[in-house]
Amino acid sequence: MKELWGNVNFRRLWLSQIALALGDAFMQMGFLELFSAHGYDPRVETAKMFFAVSLPGLVLGPVAMMYLDRWQRRTVLMVSDVVRAGIVAGIIVWLLPLLAGHVDQRNLLLAYLGIGLIGVVAAFYLPARSALLPNLVAPENLVKANTLFATSVAIATVGGRALGGLVAETAGVTWAVAANGFAYVASVSLLWRIQMNPHATTGAATSMKTGGWTEFKTGLAYLWKHPTAMPLVLLSAVFAFLLGLLAVVFIGYARDTLGLRTGGIGYLVAAAGIGAGVGICLLSKSAKQSDWLPFAQLLLAAGALIALSYITSVWLAALVVVVLGGVAATVVIYIDARLQAQVEDVRRGAVFAARGMLTSLTMVVAFWLQFGTTLLKRTPAPLVLFWLGVGAAGIAVLMLTLSRAKRA
């Protein structure tokens, strides 16, 4: 870990991600308080909010695959943060009449449009961030770097939700949402100070001759032929679908089954942070991560979801959430580290963009099912959790079989 702490460029990227995780968590809890305080259905509106931020990743995934490897990734990150800070400011201005009490209700469509624009930027930002890390860190330190990233971001996210719920209830929704804008500004200032040599790109001249569509097809062909990239990308999509369903169902479960308000939900989510820390510590101490590890984690998550569907005690629920937090955090580490280490630099951005496109697809479907159909809206949250766990167990077996066939 000494090498990472001594790497000033990595440290600045790391601090910027902590700031963004805190800001995003504050904004989410601010909107949750907005839904509760102004008579909106929190479960339905949360699904709409997450749908809005996920859809652009699906639509723009091919565009990111075409162009991301042409650009310097640090520049992509800085421009993205500046744009998102401006979008957050616009969202606050739109919400002010409602938050100030000048109107009792307001159509949140424009607010969701702003969140969707944040998703547009994220479609380029997230794969660029993952692809940039190997340009700052030596190959032998990638697992450690991803472990530190996952630990810190998980703690910042759950801590931000716990604190953000308190801020939203006491100081108001405006301050909770505005914290995200401040976080983007802080991130830009940190990224600006990163000093690095230009990394390998596909080359603008070559790309102009062949065209973006040709580059997109080349990226897909590379992904398909790579012995491990495709199974890992598909596994990411599966976990994204499960998390997309869980993110919304958990709100309904915490409110209706456990009787918690916004602040209480934030504290319950903090249990996931404890689980993330424990899981990451166990993973980092393991000398070797087996190929079957993520499938075992998926089975563990399935058991936790089924158990959660029968629990009505807050304290027992918190223990199960610890398990789910540990699984979610360690899966991200495993997949990111393997992709970063095994995919060549010039195609890394395209591979991570493809992963973002597929995970966006599954999350969009997950969120749409919860506000665009009557089935999940009318189904009690515990029952949804039960069938989610059963489905996760079946998917784990299927994905393990497909992965072995691909390697063969």
Image (cartoon, rainbow, N blue to C red):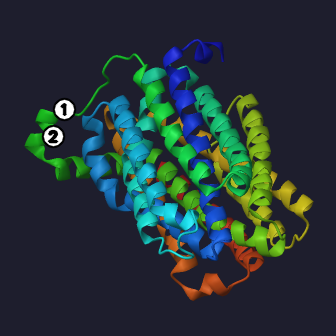
Marks 2 and 1 sit apart, C-alpha to C-alpha, by 6 Å
- Which residue sits furthest left? 209
In percent of width and height, residue 124 lies at 37, 45
Image-quadrant location for residue 42: bottom right
Residue 351 in view of the camera = yes
- Disc 2 crowd rating (10 Å Cα; few below 14, some 14-19, many 20+) is some
Q: In the rendered structure, which amino acid carries the disc numbered 1?
A: Gly
Q: Which mark is residue 356?
A: none
Which of the pair 115/53 is nearer the observer? 115
In percent of width and height, residue 107 lies at 47, 75
Contact check, label 2 and label 1, Cβ < 8 Å: yes
Q: For mark 1, what is the residue?
A: 203
In percent of width and height, residue 234 lies at 49, 56
**Quadrant where the N terminus lies?**
top right
- Residue at figure coordinates x 64%, y 63% from the top left: 32
Q: Decide: is 143 above or below 97.
A: above
Query: Would residue 128 be found to the left or right of residue 240 on screen?
Result: left
In percent of width and height, residue 204 lies at 16, 35
Image-quadrant location for residue 335: top right
Residue 355 in view of the camera = no
Query: Would residue 19 be found to the left or right of residue 117 on screen?
Result: right
Image-quadrant location for residue 17: top right
Q: For mark 2, what is the residue?
A: 207
- Residue at figure coordinates x 62%, y 60% from the top left: 243
- Residue at figure coordinates x 38%, y 17% from the top left: 196
Q: In the rendered structure, which amino acid carries the disc numbered 2?
A: Ser
